Amino acid sequence: MTTTPMSTSPIRITDVAPRDGLQNEPAPIPTADKAALVNALARTGVDEVEVTSFVSAKWVPQLGDAADLCEMVAASKPTGAVYSALVPNERGLGALLAANASAEATAGSRVIDKASVFTAASETFSTKNTNASIAETIARFRPVITRAHDAGLATRGYVSCIVACPFEGPIAAGAVADVASQLLRLGVTEIDLGDTIGAATPESIAQVIMAVRPMCDAAGADLVLHLHDTFGRASECIGVALELGVRSFDASAAGIGGCPYASTPDRRAPGNIATLALLDAIEAAGYAHDVDRAALQDAGQLALDAIARAGAMP
Ligand code: HMG
Ligand code: MG
């Protein structure tokens, strides 16, 4: 497909390195290093930083410090910055709201602006990732979304395995649309389509976007694309998504990342598209962005150094 943008509407970029980027790292990374990464990313010009997850530390030990991290970054959060965090259930949202209350008391304003719930278009992945069927996750999210909105937060609904599942293989675009429509009925303010294992091709990503975009438009919800870059096709898929009207993308500084529950015995889950590669794809399609490449490079190096130091610790 050729890329001929009809408008220069602003592109939204969320850097997910502190969450998706670090969640699969086996060696514990000090909370201060994560805080330095969040602070650095917030000053690169990206629109949003996905800071952490309020999930069970038994399931994702690396992110067991979510509350401490939020406390550490609250005071240094730049004015106008948008921070988000994942929540799998009501308990996670309760912890997020407690972090916000604490930040309001100490720093004068909340720290997390968006609560992100996550489910999948694959039953097997949903069960492995959250110990719940897709229907059970949707039921879990209902009170979470209501309470998040009551607290003035935006909400993101992730759908994983939008093209393929590491356990079930190919996933039909109709299955993705079905889950997205259930999330939209809960009232999420955006749908985030996750190509969890980087299986997307320009053709398959176009099918999914065309199946989901009309329902997002009808609901007044944003559509976000979250690509992992296993086979080096993510940039091409970004170009196709831009042609099809998608204006919001996730990426990870230095391309780190991957879901621990997408790994199989012979393959560790792949990283997100690198934020610098996303910038290249956006520019190649003729769009502008406000990200400072040098600052982003430095933030990515911070992440790589923190991972290397943690791995080197006895
Ligand atoms: P469960 O074992 O079914 O639930 O886990 P449970 O209620 O029995 O809880 C287990 C333990 O966790 C209990 O502790 C709970 O209290 C505790 P214990 O009593 O045994 O000491 N617990 C919690 N602790 C802290 N925060 C909470 C919380 N909830 C329960 N919110 C559960 C169910 C959903 C909790 C679990 O499966 C879980 O945490 N899963 C998270 C998995 C995850 O984070 N995966 C990565 C994110 S998704 C992703 O990466 C894909 C994405 O990037 C898009 C893409 O690429 O496709 C978003
Ligand atoms: Mg991911």
Image (cartoon, rainbow, N blue to C red):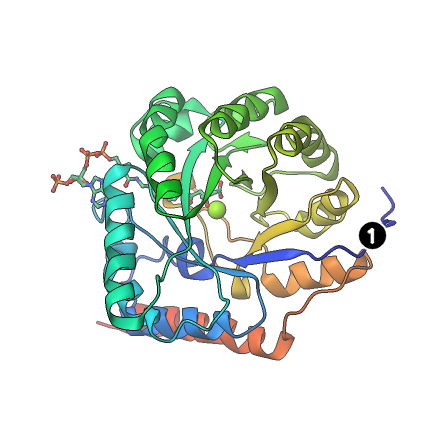
In the rendered view, does 6 fall on the left or right side of 176? right
Quadrant (top left/top right/bottom left/bottom right) for the C terminus: bottom left
Q: Residues within 10 Å of mark 1 (few under 14, many from 20)?
A: few
The reply to whether residue 122 is visible in this rendering is yes
Q: Is residue 151 or residue 139 the one in the foreground? A: 151
The N terminus lies in quadrant: top right
Q: Secondary structure at mark 1?
A: loop
- Residue at 68%, 29% (x, y): give it: 214
Q: Position of residue 117 (x, y in %)?
A: 40, 39
The number of discs equals 1
Residue 31 pos. (x, y %): 28, 69
Quarter of the image where ligand 1 sits: top left
The answer to whether residue 66 is left or right of residue 234 is left
Quarter holding residue 91:
top left
Q: Amino acid at mark 1?
A: Ser
Q: Where does label 1 land, which residue?
A: 7
Query: Residue at the spot x=29%, y=58% of the render?
Result: 100
